[in-house]
Structures are given as structure tokens and as C-alpha cells.
């Protein structure tokens, strides 16, 4: 029995997510973001080229919001204190992150890395939501860093060596 797919399905990620939600499935590859009134939001980066790279959120009642980001997203992190704050990290060798409100799909703010740094696609918040940790690398040497940022303005407070290249 041959189970390979010979053609790419003609369905957008948005249609796929809406169909999963309508069927009652919650894909494990998507982040669940609790929101106001305890609604859940399923969030994902998407796009096939620079003109379509975006962030989308789908609520548990199938409200869909998308916003163009201009970069290929990879990882997502939700602030544990502010339910209206999800960070989308650029896929390496990207240099920009956006803070997005999953409830309405708006971009709260954008921030870029220091010169000669690139993202490794991931990060996380401290449990109190006051700090953001980003996995970065030196653009020239590949040396990995974990950068500590203040979530009020996302400015760098300090950095730690990751003791390797390309921390992921």
C-alpha cells in the first residue's frame, strides 16, 4: 500500500486551521494561548514568500486574525502575565521580532537585534513576564548567546554565553 502524497493539497494554512478547529482538533504543533475570558487562541507563523510571511491566530470560536510580518517566523512565546502579548521570532538568520496581540491580530511593537547578531528562531519569557530570553548568534563566528531583554521595551539588559554555535 502506497501512502505517499503525490500532489500538494490545495488548501491554505488558514483553511487548514479553521477546519481543524471546526472538527474539534487542536494541533500539537501550534501554541495555545489563553486569552480574555479564558478563550484559547491557536497561533502560528505562516507564508511561502516575503509578500505572505505572517502571523495568524484562531480563537476557539473560529475567529481568525492574520497580520503580515515581512519576515519568515519560526518560534513563538506567550507572555505568562500579559495574555495580549505573543512574540514571533524570525527564523535564522533573521534579526527582528514582533510582539503581537493574538486577540485582534495587531502588532504591538517590533524590535531588532544588535548589529552582527541573528536570531536562532526561539526564545522564552521569565515566569513573571518581565524578561525575555532570545537565542542569538554572532553573525560572523556563529558563537551562541542567550540575550536577556526587558519586556517593557525589549532592550538588551545582559547576555550569557551558550557555549556553542547556533543555539536552538
Image (spheres, helix red, strand yellow):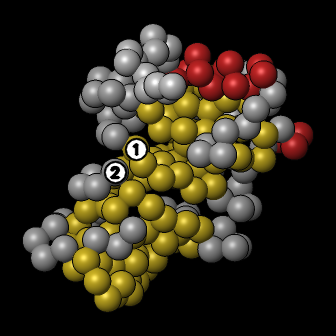
Along the viewing direction, whichever of 122 and 38 lies nearer the viewer? 122
Q: Residue at x 40, y 76 (%)?
A: 147
- The answer to whether residue 68 shows anywhere in this view is no
Where residue 22 sits, quadrant-wise, is top right
| Position of residue 89 measured from the top left corner of the image (x, y, whole percent) | 42, 53
The answer to whether 138 is drawn above or below residue 43 in the figure is below
Farthest residue toward the left? 140
The answer to whether 127 is drawn above or below residue 60 in the figure is below
Farthest residue toward the front? 1
Q: Give the mark count.
A: 2
Q: Which residue is mark 1?
A: 73
Q: Residue at x 65, y 59 (%)?
A: 79
The answer to whether 108 is drawn above or below residue 89 in the figure is above
| Position of residue 102 measured from the top left corner of the image (x, y, whole percent) | 64, 38
Q: Residue at x 74, y 61 (%)?
A: 81
Check disc 2 and report its element: helix, strand or loop.
loop
| Position of residue 166 measured from the top left corner of the image (x, y, whole percent) | 28, 71
Residue 91: assigned label:
2
Along the viewing direction, whichever of 97 and 47 lies nearer the viewer? 47
Q: Residue at x 57, y 56 (%)?
A: 77
Say whether residue 141 is left or right of residue 144: left
| Position of residue 103 measured from the top left corner of the image (x, y, whole percent) | 69, 34
Q: Is the residue under label 2 in contact with that under label 1 (CB below 8 Å)?
A: yes
Few, some or many residues within 10 Å of mark 1 (<14, 14–19, 20+): many
Check disc 1 and report its element: helix, strand or loop.
strand
Q: The C terminus is located in which quarter?
A: bottom left
Say whether residue 143 is left or right of residue 70: left
Farthest residue toward the top? 10
Few, some or many residues within 10 Å of mark 2 (<14, 14–19, 20+): some
- The answer to whether residue 65 shows anywhere in this view is yes
Amino acid at each position: 500500500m502506497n501512502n505517499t502524497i503525490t500532489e500538494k493539497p490545495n488548501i491554505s494554512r488558514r483553511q487548514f486551521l479553521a477546519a481543524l478547529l471546526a472538527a474539534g482538533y487542536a494541533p500539537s504543533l501550534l501554541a495555545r494561548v489563553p486569552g480574555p475570558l479564558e478563550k484559547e487562541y491557536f497561533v502560528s507563523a505562516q507564508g511561502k514568500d516575503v509578500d505572505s510571511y505572517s502571523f495568524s491566530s484562531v480563537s476557539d470560536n473560529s475567529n481568525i486574525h492574520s497580520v503580515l510580518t515581512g519576515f519568515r517566523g519560526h518560534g513563538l512565546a506567550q507572555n505568562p502575565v500579559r495574555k495580549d502579548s505573543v512574540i514571533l521570532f524570525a527564523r535564522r538568520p533573521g534579526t527582528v521580532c514582533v510582539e503581537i496581540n493574538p486577540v485582534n491580530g495587531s502588532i504591538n511593537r517590533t524590535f531588532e537585534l544588535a548589529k552582527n547578531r541573528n536570531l536562532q528562531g526561539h526564545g522564552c519569557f521569565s515566569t513573571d513576564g518581565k524578561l525575555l530570553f532570545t537565542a542569538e548568534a554572532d553573525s560572523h563566528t556563529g558563537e551562541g548567546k542567550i540575550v536577556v531583554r526587558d519586556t517593557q521595551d525589549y532592550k538588551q539588559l545582559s547576555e550569557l554565553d551558550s557555549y556553542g554555535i547556533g543555539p536552538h
